[in-house]
Image: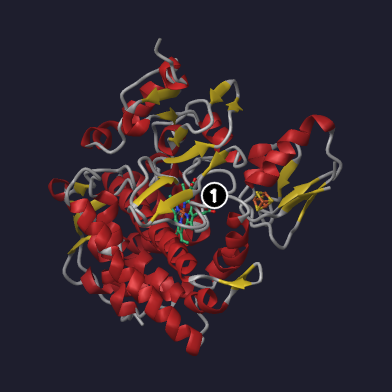
Amino acid sequence: MTEFSSKDAKACPVHFDHHTVDHTKQWPETYRKLREECPRAWTDNYDGFWVATRLSDIVGVAQQSDAFSAHKEVDFENGTSTGGVTIPPAGTTRGIPNEADNPEWEGIRRFINRRFAPRAIEERRAKAKQFTAALVDMVIETGECDFVDDLTSALPALVTMEIFGFPLDEWRKFADPFHTMVFTPIHDPAFAETVRGLDYFRERVDEEIAKRRIEPKDDFLTLLATGEINGEPLTWQQIRDLSFNILAGGVDTTTALASNALIWLGRNPGERQRLIDDPDLMPFACEEFIRFYSPIGALSRTAIKDTEVDGWTIRKGERVLMAYAGGNRDPEAFEDPEQVKIDRFPNKHVGFGAGMHRCLGSFLARMMFQEMIGEVLRRLPDYTIDEDGLRQYPSISGVNGWISIPAHFTPGAKVGAVIE
Amino acid sequence: MKVRIDADLCQGHAMCALACPELFQLSDEDGHAYVEDENVPPEYEAAVERAVRSCPEGAIQTS
Ligand code: HEM
Ligand code: SF4
C-alpha cells in the first residue's frame, strides 16, 4: 500500500510559480483568484509549499516566529542550502538578521536597530537631499533621463554606501550585481553569473573591515568591525551576511518603490498635481505605493512544528509563502484595494512584512522615497514617461521593479549640488 | 501577567497593536506604543505573547 504523506491530502492544490514571466504580467489577478477561491493553496512546485494570500493569514504566520522558522542552513561544501526566506533557497548566500531565528536574531537586531531608528535616519536626510539634487543636476539641462539609471537606483545605493562608509565612487560596482540578481529569472543561465558578481562586494567588505580594525571611523563598517554581539566580536561570516542583508534589502527595494511611484504619477497628472500642491500627502502616498506595488511581493517560512493558524494546519517541515503583495490587496483589509488612493488612511499594509522580521530599513526607505519624489516634483514637475521605452523586470519573484523608465521634461537649471 | 513597553527601544512599528489591538495603543504625538493598564486580562495573554514575539525592537516585556 502506498503511504500518503500529508502533502497528498491538501485541500486546495494549484499550479503556482512566482518565478515566471506570466506571474510578472498577471500577479494581481493570480493573487485575487487565489484569495477568493483558494486562500491557503498548496502547490507541488519547488518541493511543495503553501501560498497564503489573505492579509490575516500572512500576519498569523509572520507573528508565530516560534513555529515558523526563517533560518537558512548553508552547506558550503556542496554549495546548497535549506530553509531561509526564499522558495527555492538561493545558493549559499545567507542574509542576517532576515534568515535567522531566535536567539541569534535578537542579538543582531539589538546590535543594529539604533542605527536605523527614526532619529538616526533623520540625521541622514541632509546628505540624501544633497545627493538627490546632484543626481537631478546631471540631467536637468538635457530635458531627458532614465529615472532608474539616473535617480532611483543611484540614490539608495549612494545613501547606503555613505551609511556603511564605502567610497562613494564605487556605488555602481556595488549596486549593479544586486540590481541584476533580483530581476534575472533563477532558471536563466545568467543567474549564476550575476550571483558570482557578488564576490566583488564580499571582497570589498573584508578589505574595509580589516582597515577599520586598524583605523576606526564613525561609520557602520566600524560598528561591524569593532562591535560585539552578546560580548563577542562578530565573525567574518556574520559581517558578510549582515552587510549582504542590508545592501540587498535596502538598495533595490527602495528603487522599485520610487520607480513604480514615478510611473504612476506620470500616468496620473491630476494626482501628481495634487501631491505638488499638498506635500503633506507625501507620507500617505508613500505607504500607498508600498501597499499597491509591494516591492517585496512574497517571502517564506518553514514550520518547525505542527502549527495552526486560524483553523489552517501546517505540518512540521512544510514551507509557506507569505504573498505580501496578495495580502496588500485583500478587500477584507482595504477599501477598493485595486485602486491607488494617495491619501489612504489608515493603511495597515504588510509591504514591510509583519512580526519580528519587519523591515529594519522602513524609516530609511521612507526618507529616501520622500527625497527622490519630492525633488522630481519640485524640479521636473511636467515630466512624461516614454511608455514604449519602459522595461519591467522579467521576474518579480525577488523585487517588483523596473530596468528602464525613460522620461522627458522641460529643461531647467542646475543648483550646483555635488556627490561627496 | 503584566506588560511593559520600553519607551527607549520602541520605534513605533505597530506590530504590537496588530497582535493585540485591545491593549496596545499608539501615541498620536510620537507614534510610540503604550498600554493604559499594565495588567493583562487572562483572555489576552496569548495575544500579548504574540506581540512580544512580533516586536522588531524587543521592546515589550512581560512578567
Ligand atoms: C521600500 C523599501 C523596502 C521594502 C518594501 C522592504 C521590505 C521588507 C520586508 C517585506 C521585510 C520582511 C522580511 C521577512 O518577512 O522575512 C524586510 C526586512 C528587512 N529589511 Fe526591508 N524593505 C525595504 C527597505 C529596506 C532598507 C532601506 C533596508 C536597509 C537597511 C532594509 C533592510 C531590511 C533588513 C535587514 C530586513 C530583515 C529584518 C529582520 O529579519 O529582522 N529594507 N524588508
Ligand atoms: S511593536 Fe515594538 S517597537 Fe513597534 S510599536 Fe509595538 S512596542 Fe513599539
Between A362 and B51, the one nearer to me in the picture: B51
Residue A299: x and y in percent read 43, 42
User: Going 53% across and 67% down the picture, which residue do you hit?
Assistant: A121
Image quarter where the N terminus of chain A lies is top left
Please, what is the three-letter code of the amino acid marked with disc 1? Arg
User: Going 23% across and 73% down the picture, which residue do you hit?
Assistant: A138
- In the image, is residue A271 above or below residue A317? below
Residue A33: x and y in percent read 36, 21
The answer, for residue B40, to whether it is visible in the render is yes
Between B43 and A259, the one nearer to me in the picture: B43
Residue A146: x and y in percent read 20, 60
The answer, for residue A380, to whether it is visible in the render is no
User: Going 43% across and 16% down the picture, which residue do you hit?
Assistant: A4
Between A54 and A356, the one nearer to me in the picture: A356
- In the image, is residue A271 above or below residue A212? above
- The furthest residue to the front: A1
Please identify the quarter of the rendering in which residue A165 is found. bottom left
Residue A290: x and y in percent read 43, 46
- Left or right of A306: which side holds A299? left
In the picture of the structure, the residue carrying the numbered disc 1 is A358
- Left or right of A280: which side holds A414? left
- The furthest residue to the left: A388
